[in-house]
Amino acid sequence: MEERPITVVLTDAGVAELGGILKFWFKDNPALGFCGNCKSVNPEGHYFQMVIEEKSGSKTVDIEFNVHHHYIKAFLHAPSLKKLGFTA
């Protein structure tokens, strides 16, 4: 079964605090705001956990971020990235 993309959208406070770090994986989307695609998320617990898959040549590593819930505006699942406003 193919994994569905998970897009995480940051609040304005999240962009202000985390935008410098996450700019390598997150982009500004006119429809959604500052957002990025994650391999997985876990909204339970004291922090919102995001796992981003980083590909470097033939290697793939998972980068895990744990952020305060108030930095997350929404997270969305869709059958394809195009449904979430991404074109490539």
Image (tube, rainbow, N blue to C red):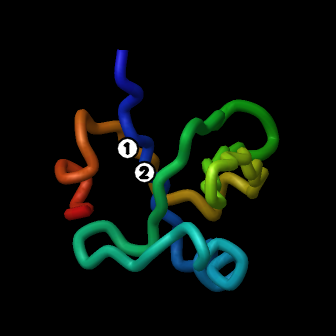
8, 13: nearer the viewer: 8
Residue at point 53%, 47% (across, down): 38
Q: What residue appears at the point 72 percent right and 45 percent down from the top-left corner? A: 62
Q: Is residue 58 visible?
A: yes
Residue 37 shown left or right of residue 71 in the figure: left
In this rendering, is residue 42 above or below 2?
below
- Of all residues, the one furthest to the top in this rendering is 1
For mark 1, give the secondary structure.
Answer: strand
The x and y percentages for residue 5 are 39, 41
Would you call the spot at circle 1 few (<14 residues within 10 Å), some (14-19), or many (20 or more)? few
Q: CA distance from mark 1 to mark 2?
A: 5 Å
Q: Which of the image's four quarters has the N terminus?
A: top left
Q: Looking at the picture, does residue 6 appear above or below residue 66?
A: above
Crowding at mark 2 (Cα within 10 Å: few <14, some 14-19, many 20+):
many
Q: To which residue does mark 1 refer?
A: 76
Amino acid type at mark 1: Leu
At label 2, the amino acid type is: Thr
Circle nearer the N terminus (1, 2): 2
Judging depth in this view, the residue of 62 and 5 nearest the camera is 62
Name the residue carrying label 2. Answer: 7
Q: Residue at x 35, y 23 (%)?
A: 2
Q: Quadrant of the C terminus?
A: bottom left
Q: Position of residue 78 (x, y in %)?
A: 28, 38
Q: Is residue 80 above or below residue 22?
A: above
Q: Is residue 68 above or below residue 39?
A: below
- Marks 1 and 2 in Cβ contact (< 8 Å): yes
